[in-house]
Image: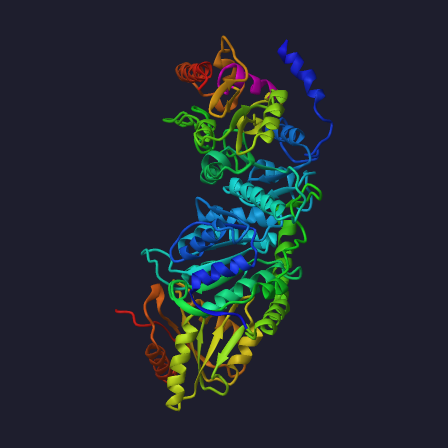
Amino acid sequence: MTENLNVFAVRTLTQKEYFAPGHRACQGCAEVLAVRLVAKALGRNVIVSNATGCMEIVSSPLPFTSWRVPWFHVAFENTAAVASGVEAGLKALMRKRRIPRKKIISLAMAGDGGTADIGLQALSGALERGHDMIYICTDNEAYMNTGIQRSSSTPFGASTTTSPVGKVKMGQITWKKNMPAIAAAHNIPYVATACPSYPIDLVQKVKKAAAIEGPAYIHILSVCPTGWRSAPELSIKLGRLAVETGVFPLYEVENGKYHLSMDFPKLKPIREYIKLQGRFRHLTDDLIEEIEKRVQKEYEALKERAKQGV
Amino acid sequence: MGKRVGMEVSIAAAEAVKQCNVDVVSAYPITPQTHIVEHLSEIVANGELDAEFFCVESEHSALSVCVGSEAVGARSFTCTSAQGLALLSEITYIVSGLRLPIVMIVANRTLSAPLSIWNDHSDAMMIRDCGWIQYFVENGQEVYDHVFISYRTAEDREVLFPAIINMDGFTLSHVIEPIELIEQEKIDQFLSPYQPLYSLHPDHPVTMGAFALPSIFAETKKAQEVALCSSMPKILEVWKAFGDLTGRYYRPIETYQAEGADTLLITMGSFGETASVAVDQMRAEGRSVGLVKIRLWRPFPFDDFKNAVKGAKHLVVIDRAVSVGGPKGPVASEVKSALYGMEGHPAIYDFVAGISGRDVAPIDFIKMVDKAKIEIEEGNQEGYELYGVRE
């Protein structure tokens, strides 16, 4: 029932597109859908600082652009710093009455590599300094732009071009880095997870982040058919399964307090999620069970945290 | 005339940044640049400058913050040295490609390894081709003056390039010199508030930093190269305007006792002052020796340089960095390419001296001139040595 409602509710979003069609994203790319929803949520009064990566490449081949809002790309690892500079520059210019005062959102966007790996230091610095900005990580769980190399955000067991399945190894041997927890550890006012398979939830979270003063961090799971070896038409379904199996729970951390956006008394079997993706094709029953146990444990811990209100 | 006061050069640099009414300062501490940032933070803390000040988590972010603020139209400043410059070097190429007129002071220091905090030009040479306007200044007054000169030049719509002021670490950054301060009214007259040609603002959305396919990249690079070389008349014009305002006229190439000299010392940075003492001594002995100082490193003033050394028989180039495995000193290599094909061009002897802050006294310049003379006369037309090294 809720699923159907969500399908209709999307139509209540603005018809205006700030991220124009005609970009070069792959078929079934959920990341680009996430970006489009983020752009809708924030409207025109935004300046986007985008890290190097898929979203940058698909949207800005000189002399074309998909962006109808001011958009800035500098490098891979420094997006948080750049967006903090945008915020600081605007603040100074408005205070010194050189440009009219109005609310302009500074939005930083980067993928999981640009956030959890190479951009982590700049992100930590920007969060610690307390800039009034939104940082969005669109997480497709590997370096997809360069050809599906593993990142610290790649889930355990996934096969990538640098965590391949071999005679003695079975893909990624480390567990996904918990970026939202790292962001929350900076004691910023707002942290959330979202997924474009739940568009209304995503848009609401982005709007909330925009309304809050100070740094906000939103971690968006973005299904990547190319890298996940999944059918493009299954991207929305996969996003939902990630949430329903507990692999990627949707929650918020407001002023340090955890709150589950969606609770499931019983999680769906993880196999339903895994079986649709070629990157997990090699996983044995034992390994799937190991993953499921860990996912359940982490989900319970999160639930407990939300219940305790801490 | 402005007030002449004894002041540490780093403090004077920070005071100049304040007088430019900079909007955003972002930096990370590294010796010997620290005093500039410390004093700027005091200035902001005391409300003497209305700016956003950030001591960020790395030099890479320090420049990146400036990139963001400059792109929205805020006048931005950062400064660094050696390892810090190396860390942010990735962004230097991007800033010039984006044509953002950020001004950065580099208190020149040796690049590791071995780790050394002392002065030479190895850091500046690492980013030689980053596409910024690059000055090498000689004394504290020049540091102070070039902050104003840099902003006005960089922000000119016919220029729009970032600028680096290279000042020797410790030798300049940590010494107290007499500085003639310029009245604020004069500065306000010389430097108007920054009016960007393009900036990031929702009222006029633009895309900045798009990626280029091979089919268009070469054209963008060509445009950048032409623009930087064409900025030369503006660089000269701003120096002239500054001279008219203060009486201190600067040129891309400065000469001292060079007219008709057989031998010319070529220096860059604070060595110019020491070398001029040596030149005085040699002139007093009746020797035909002069000095040519390169103040503008990029865009390189080829014509001015050629004119300055015309008629000389020997050039003694004093480099402050080694191009390991390459053509030895980077300044000598530049000089050679400037003079290549020039009929009857002088013999060029290259010394790398004073790396990692090793002291070079006037007597050392005399010794280098003597050594070069012997070597050249013995037929070593393009000699090179690391001066004073124990082998």
Q: Residue at x 63, y 55 (%)?
A: B194
Q: Residue at x 71, y 31 (%)?
A: A17
B300 is higher (above) or lower (below) than A84: below
Left or right for B378, reference A95: left
Front residue of A292 and B110: B110
Residue sticking out furthest to the right:
A15
Residue B276 falls within the magenta-colored stretch: no
Residue sticking out furthest to the bottom:
B286
Front residue of B207 and B11: B11
| The N terminus of chain B lies in quadrant | bottom right
Q: Position of residue A212 (x, y in %)?
A: 57, 30
Front residue of A65 and B283: B283
The secondary structure that most of the magenta stretch takes on is helix
Q: Position of residue A202 (x, y in %)?
A: 60, 24
Q: Position of residue A121 (x, y in %)?
A: 44, 39
A276 is higher (above) or lower (below) than A104: above
**Is residue A283 at all visible to an observer of this figure?**
yes
Q: Which residues are magenta?
A: A236-249
